[in-house]
Amino acid sequence: MKVLYLDNNATTRLADEAREAMLPFLSEFYGNPSSMHTFGGQVHREIEKARERVAALINAEPGEIIFTSCGTESDNTAIMSALQSKPEKRHIITTRVEHPAVLNFCKALARRGYRVTFLPVDKQGRLDLQELQDSISDDTALVSIMYANNESGVIFPVEEISAIVKSKGITFHTDGVQAAGKISVDIKKLDVDMMSLSGHKIHGAKGIGALYISRGTRFSPYIIGGHRESGRRAGTENVASIVAFGKACEIADEHVRSGDNRVRVLRDRLEKGLIDKCPDTRINGDRDNRLPNTLNISFEYVEGEAILLRLNEFNICASSGSACTSGSLEPSHVLRAMGVPFTAIHGSVRFSLSRYTMDQDIDTVLEKMPLIIKELRELSPFGREADNLK
Ligand code: PLP
C-alpha cells in the first residue's frame, strides 16, 4: 500500500536524481578524495562540484561551505567554534524554541558554567527583537537563533536579528536546516557568520550536513584529525551522500527560484479544509510568516497520538507535539513556549508537505480527518463534556 507521507520536516524521500548521482560513489568510484592518484582525484572533483551546488543554494562561495555528518553536528560545531574563538566570553543567547541540536547543546554548556539566555516567543511563535537587544552584554560570545522552526514553521527575521547582533560585534549563527531549500535564502543579504544545513530535509541522503562559515569568521574545528575540509573538519568524507546533497541542493534551488508555489497552495487547501470540516481547531504559529510546507494544527479534546495512530491505519504519516510520539516524554517545548493551552498541545498535529505531495494526498487527508476527529471526540471524556457544554 502506498504511504501518504506528510512528515517532511522530519525527513524527506531521497530525490531520484540524487540517488542516481550518488550510486557510482557506492560502487566503482571508491577512491579516497585525499589520495594523490587520479582515482582519488576524480572523487575529490565531485566533492567540489557538490560544494559549489550547496553554496549556490544560499548564494555563498564554495570555500565558505564545509561538509559535516548532519545538521546537529553543524549546530554543535558552530556554537563551539564561536565559544573557542572568544574564550574570555561566557554568555550565549538562543531561543526557547530551537531544535534540540542547539537547545540541548546550550543546556549542556550551561551545566559546564556558561550563562545562557533562552529568549521567549509570543503566542504566534515570534521573537521580541527588543528583548534580544536587551539581553546582549559585553560577555556575549554568540547568538544562535534558528531561521525557521521545524514544528511551527515560523520564520524568524534573520536579517534584522543579524543587524542587531553584528552591530555589537557578536558572532551570529543561524540553524537554517528547515529554511534552505524551502524558501529563498541569500546569505550575502543576511550577513550571518554561520548557518547549518542538512541533506535529508531537502531530498538528499541522511547523515550529511553542511556548515556555512562566512569568509573572515574566526573558526575553530570541532572534529579534529586529518587535514580535510581545509583543516576545518577532519574525517574521510561521506562522498556518496555529499554528491547526493549537491544534487538535492541544485534541484531545490531550481524550485525555489522558479517561484513554484504548488506546495504552499496544497498546504493552504489542507489548512482551510481542516478548519472548515473539523470544529474546535486552532493553527499554531504565525500564519503570515511560515514555511510554505508546514501546517501545525491543534484539535481540541483529542490526543495527537491517537490521531497519529488512526492516520497510520490509513498509511498517512504526520507527527504530533504531544507526548511520546516525538520520541520524548515531554509535550512539545515549542508549543509550550508559545503558550499554546495544554489541551491544544495534546491535540496538535504537524503536517509537512514536499514537492512530491499530490493533490489526491490532500483529498485523502481531508476525507479521513473529520471522521477520525469525530470518532476520537466521541470516545474522549473531554470531547463529550465539551459537547454537553454547547
Ligand atoms: N535543526 C533543525 C531546525 C531541524 O529540524 C533538525 C532536524 O530535525 C536538525 C537541526 C538536525 O538535523 P539532523 O537530523 O541532520 O541532525
Image (tube, rainbow, N blue to C red):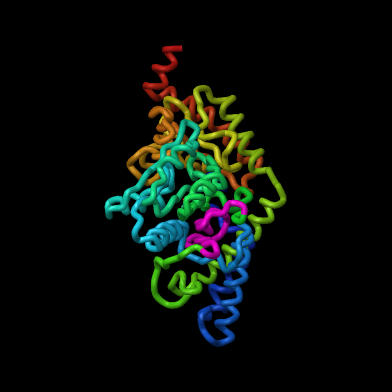
92 displayed left or right of 270: left
Q: Nearer the viewer, residue 21 or 314?
A: 21
Q: Is residue 214 rendered magenta in the image? A: yes
- 384 is higher (above) or lower (below) than 201: above
Residue 222 occupies quadrant: bottom left
Question: At 61% from the left edge and 29% from the top edge, which residue is drawn?
Answer: 272
Point 36% across, 53% down: residue: 105
Total of numbered circles in the picture? 0
Residue 346 on image: x %, y %? 40, 32
Residue projecting furthest to the bottom: 37
In percent of width and height, residue 113 lies at 27, 53
The image position of residue 253, as x and y in percent, is 65, 56
Please say if 192 is above or below 153: below
Q: Is residue 178 visible?
A: yes
Q: Quadrant of residue 277?
A: top right
Instruction: Give me the residue at 45% from left, 53% from top.
Output: 170
Can residue 210 be spotted in the picture? no
Return the residue nearer the eye: 198 or 139: 139
Left or right of 63: which side holds 337? Answer: left
Residue 137, given in percent of the width and then of the height, sits at: 39, 47
Q: Nearer the viewer, residue 269 or 156?
A: 156
Residue lying at the far right in this picture: please name it. 258
Please report the bounds of the magenta region as a residue range. 189-216
Whether residue 86 is in magenta: the answer is no
